[in-house]
Image (tube, rainbow, N blue to C red):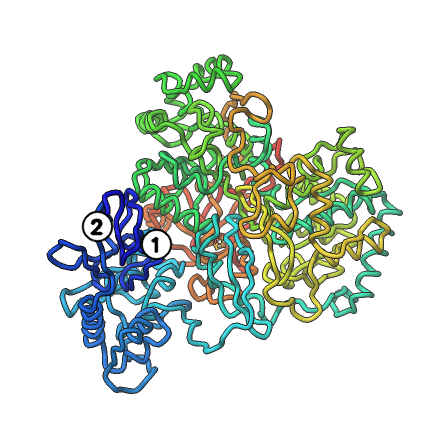
Amino acid sequence: MNATGAVIDGHAVEVRNGETILDAARRAGVDIPTLCYTHGLRPEGGCRVCLVEIAGAGRPAAACHTPIQLGMEIRTATPQIEALRHDILALQLAAGEPGAVHRYAGTELGNLLARYQVAGSPAEAGRDGPSVDATHPYLRFDPSICITCRRCLHACEEIQGQFVYGIADRGAGARLIFGHDERFADSACTACGACVDRCPTGAVTDADRFDGMAAESRTRSVCGYCGVGCRIEVEAKAGRVLRIRGVETAVVNRGHLCAKGRYAHAWHHSRDRLTRPLVRENGELKPIAWDEAMALLVDRLRAIRDQHGPNALGVFTSSRSTNEAAYLLQKLFRTAIGTNNVDCCARVCHSSTALALQTVTGTGAATASYADIDSAGCVVVAGANPTEAHPVLGARIKQVVLRGARLVVIDPRRIELADYADLHLQLLPGSNVALFNALAKVLIEEDLIQHGYLEERVEGLEEFRRFVDGVSLDESARATGVSVARIREAARLLGGSGRVLFVHGLGLTELTQGTASVMALSNLGMLTGSIGWPGAGMLPLRGQNNVQGNADMGSMPNLLTGYQPLDDPEVRARVERQWGVAPPRERGLTIPEMIDAARRGDIRALWIQGEDVVQSDPYERHVIEALAALDFLVVQEMFLSETARYAHLVLPAAGALEQEGTFTNGERRIQLVRPAVPPPGDARPDWRVIRDAAAAMGASARYESPADVMDEIAEVAPQLFGGVSYRRLEGDGLQWPCPSPEHPGTATLHAGKFLRGKGRLVAIPYRPSPEHGVEGFPYTLVTGRVLEHYNVGTMTRRTPNRRLVPADVLEIHPEDALREGIDEGAEVIVESRWGCVRTAARRSRRVAPGTLFLSFHFPESHTNRLTGPHVDPDSKCPQYKATAVRLQVA
Ligand code: SF4
């Protein structure tokens, strides 16, 4: 007996609290075979393959769920145990279909059968049984080789939180089912693939596993869809992506991916990829050689600058591309052209967040990290739909709630997370400020605030108290549609939960009170003492894969790289040293301002990199008129987008899977992006095209690789990036600020002290938006995303995701549908003061009566014909999230 530890097969092992025999054995390097067990998930303990002998115990025990205890003496591979395992596996095989043994080859079960020399009955090898469910474009299920070990079921529940799988019938007749015994395609499966990674037999598998191709290369990179920034491993052969898996060790996603990141990669070899530069001649776009294209680009930009001045030009840099490309493009415009007319799509999504958080904390980015979700005691999700738009984080929020964390969802739609929430505050679109002020009032009135934190770290409490004294809860209830009782209940939940993690999205920012909404939410963060601690803080979910990085790089008209002010003499001197020329002093124009200026004829040339503004920006008609008025429009794109159709010059671009550089995700983590496949035809990586154009225009551009560009970024903005280099970005990358080569990066911002000194409480009165109460337009339209598609659908529409969701659909509450005489699936005409679209309608209780929802993934829908010209007066972020509309049956 070992009194201080335990002994496994003669190895002394330390006994650690909470460990099982299997955990301890694996730590000691002792191999115990398993079948229904999978690391990281709850042990099922059903298959008995991991049986071991414990001295003094009457019978063998399953190692996967038996706790290790002091003094235990364990033997894992006695002849009796090995014989038992053989018999268990033989029984398993006998229960399956004849011939199944051949189809287990190469799987975990197949390896165990070979190890224990268990032979199957002779039958034809490798044929699918007739009952295979191949209804899903990405997943397939073969019940004839399913052993009902439940690993898929545990993965679905414990990773994705989706509960798709069940077991029907009992004993030898037990079988795996989807939902209410539905087909795979009809089930609630979100196609995250977590079940596939855990299935030990190949019964649940990727449809693409059967393409028979072995990979030639495996490349580690970062998903090119949303701002979560999941790390991926891409298998490729002959220039084609075969399959994508999550990186198990990645801190961002721990091996998990969503349907887009894992499966939606077919866009890269789509036949309509742009492979050559195109020039407009006699109204048509015609192929042209790269050297001619570059000469034309440089000549036209120079000519317009010389004739109309540098401020007659502008650039929209791409949040789909790399940090290095964004940095080089803003630098080109600030140096070779001489204008600060530089902006990016952060303007039309999180510019309100950046401005609000900069004002109240001193930094315009997430104060928290994704890992904080796991340790949060209370999560507020406001104006975000993470399970569809940021699915890997959405699953993580579900998991922490299933483990007991409190959840408050604030959203005009009953999003999926509302089903998991303690409270869903279904407010009227655009009324966030009224609701947050009311919550703040109750927190103060009922003394649910963190006095110590506020006294030590926050300014403006007395003024804020006076402000909320004047807030009427009854008026707030009228403005928001949320009852006073519910407001009180929510405030008590927040005030009584300790620190809170506030997760927000575009439902707050894309409003005329966008900046105000985020500030009002931050007030709740300050009052509950939540900012600057692990497991709490502000976590805005960034939309595009590199929207954070794009703004970080200086793609803003009023700030240089690293959010440095244009007029700071020290900054200007440092930038001039690196660039050889000082940036212009005068603040440039934002995207909406550039569109307006182009419409007026003040902007004569635009370079739009990887952004389909015709489809994605509000007030489509106005955008088209502006683009059509330009003397020169250059578009750098992968496809002939709606915007590229108005271009004078189109430059074919490389996609996220085809270029080298870095992306920065929503938790400020800079990660390496590597090319897994080459770009098609003559398409070139963005950074290289921009570098060559800059060199041709006489700007400093001596970079051999994107790593050289990052070295310059570190010199230009040392407070945020001084310690960042490609060498240090291997693996999980670095979270900025990372000011020196020794600095480990920053997971929690404002720990101990706000970057601006003290945090600020800001009194912000609620103001209804110009789309509230518009006579003759009784409904309020909210726009947003669905799980299967991404942004304007450029990539996902060119994948089998189109089979999953083939079109945008208008969600309407059944009562409204009844009143309007709209049947399920009927065509309706939706009309706002700014435009009109035709779409199919779906009855849904996810929206409240009076509210409609429409996604914007398909160009045929023209959703942004409906959205209008209103912008937040401070951030200039357009209002997408509340538009007054009326309906008519088509
Ligand atoms: Fe890609 Fe976002 Fe999905 Fe992760 S959650 S796989 S980053 S789309």
Q: Earlier in the sequence, mark 2 or mark 1?
A: 1
Whether residue 854 can be seen here: no
Looking at numbered disc 2 in the image, what kind of residue is underneath it? Met
Report the disc number at residue 72: 2
Residue that extends furthest to the left in the rendered view of this protein: 58
Residue that extends furthest to the right in the rendered view of this protein: 306
Q: CA distance from mark 2 to mark 1?
A: 14 Å
Whether residue 607 can be seen here: yes
Q: Position of residue 123 (x, y in %)?
A: 27, 86
Task: Out of 31 and 441, give the one closest to the viewer.
Answer: 31
Secondary element at tag 1: loop
Looking at numbered disc 1 in the image, what kind of residue is underneath it? Ala
Q: Are marks 2 and 1 in contact (CB under 8 Å)?
A: no
Q: Position of residue 6 (x, y in %)?
A: 25, 49
- In the displayed structure, would residue 143 be above or below residue 508? below
Image quadrant containing the C terminus: bottom left
Q: Is residue 659 left or right of residue 252?
A: right
Task: Out of 793 and 93, give the one closest to the viewer.
Answer: 93
Residue at 49% across, 12% down: 462
**Residue denoted by label 1:** 28
Q: Is residue 57 left or right of residue 246?
A: left
> Badge 1: how crowded within 10 Å, few (<14), some, or many (20+)?
some
- In the displayed structure, would residue 286 be above or below residue 755? below
Q: Position of residue 448 (x, y in %)?
A: 36, 20
Residue at 32% across, 63% down: 186
Residue at 35% across, 27% down: 487
